[in-house]
Image (tube, rainbow, N blue to C red):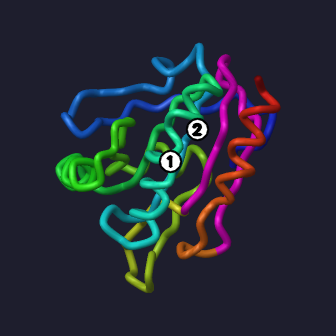
Amino acid sequence: MVDIGNHAPDFSLVDTSRERRSLGEFKGKNTVLAFFPAAFSSVCEKEMCAFRDSMAELNDLNANVVGISVDGPFTNAAFAERNGLQFPLLSDYSYEAVRAYGVALDDFAGMPGYTAAQRSVFILDAEGTVRFKWIADNPGQEPDYSVVKEELHKIG
């Protein structure tokens, strides 16, 4: 389990173009890692669009946004295109990141053997230290976007 003050675990996941992306490439800016359970579900769509609609403000706070789900890169690409998402969506189809961050939601929706990402937000500072973490009590719960922005303000 990753806690505040820990160095964030690195990962190597594919983006919507099937290019490998690692956490290290986002260093130098604050990074919002937004784990979401399933592309095209209503709450996930609302969440990713909320981040999309806040990008100007988040950029002013020197922040990257990176969405991570266990969906395949093809699904994430269609999801990004449908919603006009301009930040990276990474595919954790091998569960590398969800397990490293402690947000693997096993037997999701009562389906034995199906693992999804538990909806969660980790804010990392420019050096990759976890400065904030929020994990949903249930998949239908969205993060408090104003708190995410407040935490980014605190980092500076």
Residue 108 locus on image (x, y percent): 45, 76
Quadrant of the rendering where the C terminus is positioned: top right
105, above or below 66, in the image:
below
In the image, farthest residue toward the top: 28
Q: Pointer 1 and pointer 2: residues touching (CB < 8 Å)?
A: yes
Q: Quadrant of residue 71?
A: bottom left
- Identified by mark 1, the residue type is Phe
56, above or below 69, in the image:
above
Disc tally is 2
Residue at image location 24% in from the left, 28% down from the top: 19
The image's mark for residue 32 is 2
Residue at image location 60% in from the left, 72% down from the top: 141
User: Any magenta on residue 31?
Assistant: no
- Identified by mark 2, the residue type is Val
Residue at image mark 1: 51
Local SS, label 1: helix
Range of residues picked out in magenta:
119-137
Q: Quadrant of residue 32?
A: top right
The tag earlier along the polypeptide, 1 or 2, is: 2
